[in-house]
Image (cartoon, coloured by chain):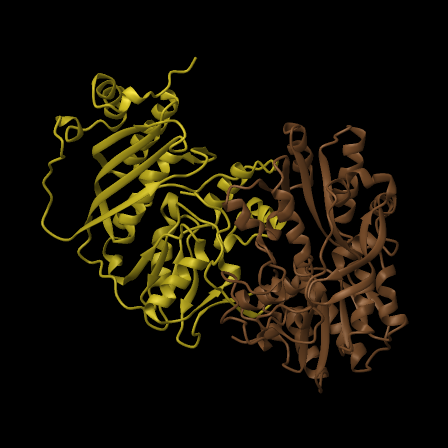
Chain colours: A yellow, B brown
Amino acid sequence: MNKKITLRHGDGGLHTSKLIHDIFYRHFDNEILTGYQDAAMFTTEAGRLAFTTDSFVVKPIFFPGGDIGKLAISGTINDLTTAGAVPLYLSAGFVIEEGFEIEKLNQIAASMGETCKRAGAKIVTGDTKVVEKGLVDGAYINTSGIGRVQECFHPRQITSGDEIILTGTIAEHGTAILLERYDLGLQSNIKSDCRPLSEIIPALGDLLKHVKLMRDPTRGGLATTLCEISESHHIGALIEEENLQIRPAVGAVHELLGTDPLYFASEGRMILVIEKGHGLEIVNRLKGLESCSDAEQIGTFDKENSKVCLQTPLGGKRILSMLENQMISRIC
Amino acid sequence: MTQEEKRLIGKAVSQINESVKSDIRIMEVCGTHTHQIARFGIRNLLTPKIHLVSGPGCPVCVTEPGYIDVLITLLKRENVTVATFGDLLRVRGLSGSLEERKSFGQKVVTVYSPEDVLDLAKRNTGQNIVFAAVGFETTAPLYAALIQTAQEEKINNFFLLTSLKRMEPAIRFILGESGVHIDGMLCPGHVAAITGNGPFLPVTAEYHIPAVICGFEGMDLITSIGILCRQITGEIPVQFMNTYKRCVRDAGNPVALRLIKDVFDSSDVSWREIGLIRDSALILNHRYEEYDASRRFGLKMESAPTAFPDGCECGKVLIGEKTPDMCVNFGRLCTPDHPIGPCMISSEGACAAYYRFGGGKI
């Protein structure tokens, strides 16, 4: 029988200590974490820092293309990336349901360690709590992260003519979760796009000075994120539907279910708003990255439109509105 | 879409816009057409002289409040679980919505495929599973097949509460009694794939109105609107046409039609916000009445008030008399987040499509 997490694993005693050593220290291994302090200590260079936190309650915990651990690290690293920051240090807090299989926790920690390594970040502090069966659904994770903001990155007001870049295909994470969650009996190869995007920052280097804003289109998908940007900057946009890329299998699922992929989350894509005239240069730079090889300019901000509009392939135009009803919950 | 297709569409749109000199009203009966017209931004491509108005072809929109109330009443029984497709969850009866009941912990299960319901029944033999069977001829064969499977497999804890409707009586109501003026009709491709041309032939033969069975791609819609405009302006004679031959055969789908005939009888039913339309319901016939939830649980549907008290214009939107933006509540009191009328709930509802995609005004 598989070994299970018990309440003793969260009591701060011998079992907690063993769990931390056998699983977390093993996969997150670094000297700041294993320095046996209650708080991590580290030195940083002078300059701006970015700091972010996020909690992850995704259901199911394991899904095609990832798991809650990979998602928890990617989510926080991508939030740091939106601030033009190279990720440095992360924290990880676990709330685990009594009875959760230890081997599953081991797999989750392994993918967290691997994802951190890929992004060049370290988990330097953490916490584990165990709650009675039924109080949480498997395991929840909170991650926070600190990163160093690049000197040349200065988020600023979007103006007419600024160009919008999307780094790849849309809706894969949300669709993968949808298929798993509702056991629709559809055979597909759809995987979550969940991954860290921190390589964007060093790759763009000095070009970051032309980036006015970055956002990752997670909950609410591309449409909702674009609407939020448009509202906060008081400017409309025109998106070319034909420049949006959607994998055929993802498109087919949404066609079948009558749902709209524009409102389904990505967890490994970035929207970049670029100073007018520099879009192409940045697209070309991004295309050289494994995580952004399908980057395209998808539209422009435009004071002619008061809202975010979509130019359809037929030549018609329609509004892209914000998501009002949740299509699926607990996707991250 | 290829450059050549785009060129052809551009040409077709220009021809349409040049040919229409006075105001015309074209009704799309089907909710999926309503959604697609808005999604492709087609209103925005056409001259404002062409008024595309919606019809009663969104099944959720025409489901009467009394039906929802009966489902809610059923939930009070310990041994009943109500299964439904997601789009019915938020529709309100006079006693609330299934979504509210679900949040109170009552036994409402959302399903994504009709087969899921039989699995649910097999897994929960102590529960009576009542499936909310809503739709038109498009979905009726699926429900019929389920009932026959339940009978073959001797599943005796599965029931349908039907609110299934027929398209032809509704179209006759709009073109006849309602007094609404329509110059042309886009007929629903999905329903026609089951029924064939039959239910739609009277539009041209008896009411002398141009009618085209139409598919759901942008090219289908533009082509069909173009044909209707040419007939309306007198460029070509009024005649019934089918531009969706890749899916619709003249005689329809014989297997599906047989299933409908085997399992259902027709009857009168009240359409939400529209009223009673004779002979427009499909109800379980005597051979399958043991699967009828209203009979099994002794339920009677109360007839609904003819209009909602808060000025909702869904009734007029559903017969093409008004467009959603003509309703005082639209976009102000009535939004997808706080829908007042049923046409704001389903993605196929005219109001939801107008709200979400901007209707004709951008």
The reply, left or right, for residue A245 in relation to residue B79 is: left
Q: Is residue A311 visible?
A: no
- Which quadrant of the rendered structure holds the C terminus of chain A? top left
Residue A189 % position (x, y): 54, 37
Q: Is residue B35 visible?
A: yes
Residue A1 % position (x, y): 43, 12
Going by the picture, which residue comes out furthest to the bottom?
B21
* Quarter where residue B34 is shown: bottom right
Going by the picture, which residue comes out furthest to the right?
B205
Residue B48 % position (x, y): 63, 81
Residue B229 % position (x, y): 75, 77
Q: Is residue B295 above or below residue B189?
A: above
Closer-to-camera residue (B349/B74): B74
Q: Is residue B235 above or below residue A82?
A: below
Closer-to-camera residue (B155/B101): B101
Q: Residue at x 39, y 45 (%)?
A: A268
* Quarter where residue A115 is shown: top left
Q: Is residue B240 above or below residue A74?
A: below
Number of numbered discs visible in the structure rendering: 0
Closer-to-camera residue (B200/B88): B88
Closer-to-camera residue (A138/B16): A138
